[in-house]
Image (cartoon, rainbow, N blue to C red):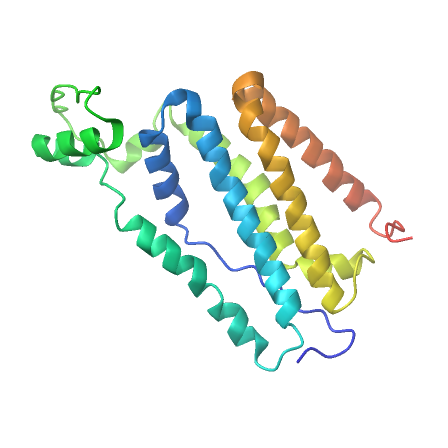
Amino acid sequence: MATKGAVPKSTQSKRNPLDYPIATSLITEFTPKHHRAISMGMVSAAWYLGATVAAVVGFALCDVDGGWRLMLGSAIVPCVFLLIGRCKVPESPLWPKSKGRHEEARRVVFRVYGADVILEGEEEEPKHKAGFAKVFSKGYAARIVLLGILTLCQVVPMYAIYTFGPQIMCAFGLGVGKSAILGESVLSLFFLVGSLPAMFWLNSMGRRSLFIRSLFLMAVGLLALGLFPTAPFSR
């Protein structure tokens, strides 16, 4: 049981580091181009929805004896649905095609896209296999560095906010003890609400323009918190 005035630990569970790139790659490959932005946006929205629900579950079970076990066990429910749903997810047709299994690749294309889509002919095999150093060669190195910096500046702070969400709520006077978890759920809800219009702005506004504007707004918010850490937000 949580003691009075104590800061509960975040209930946000860690996501599989391999799940996100694999799932998003499959969605990108199987989704038509004009629907791709919405499909990818739904992935982010679903993640924030799960984070919000996790915080609400933590708030409900915080004062229950052995509640932390129930918090961890509650993750079984979405896992069961995901496991059942992914049993029928087909392999990427590009994989069996690269192995010479063209009939298997055509069956996947027929299942996903229908009879109107025909798999292109076998591509010529590259004369030389690209090594790991190719990723950091000219033309790719700058992109890798840019993506690394963006990940460092966006994903790492987001995980820090989720991991230490209750402590951050307490530090800014937005909640004490159990109520700090509820404050974290509200914070997560803002992430969820913000991701919804972005699904449609990606196509109308453009990915680069939307990304730059989003980074600017995030920088303004973090700068305000950094310059005025003792501001009376709760008063």
At x 90% / y 51%, what residue is drawn? Answer: 232
Quadrant for the N terminus, please: bottom right
At x 37% / y 60%, what residue is drawn? Answer: 80
- Residue 10 drawn above or below residue 25: below
Which residue is outermost to the right?
A: 235
At x 67% / y 69%, what residue is drawn? Answer: 8
Work out whether residue 220 can be spotted.
yes
Work out whether residue 9 can be spotted.
no
Which residue is outermost to the front?
A: 115
- Residue 15 drawn above or below residue 76: above
- Residue 12 drawn above or below residue 45: below
Front residue of 202/87: it is 87
**x then y, percent, for residue 59:** 66, 66
**x then y, percent, for residue 154:** 58, 40
Front residue of 114/184: it is 114
Asked if residue 140 lies left or right of residue 57, the reply is left
Residue 137, quarter of the rendered image = top left
Front residue of 153/232: it is 232
Asked if residue 115 lies left or right of residue 199, the reply is left
Front residue of 227/202: it is 202
- Residue 106 drawn above or below residue 188: above
At x 79% / y 59%, what residue is drawn? Answer: 171
**x then y, percent, for residue 67:** 58, 76
Asked if residue 177 lies left or right of residue 83, the reply is right
**x then y, percent, for residue 198:** 58, 29
Q: How many marks?
A: 0
Residue 118, quarter of the rendered image = top left
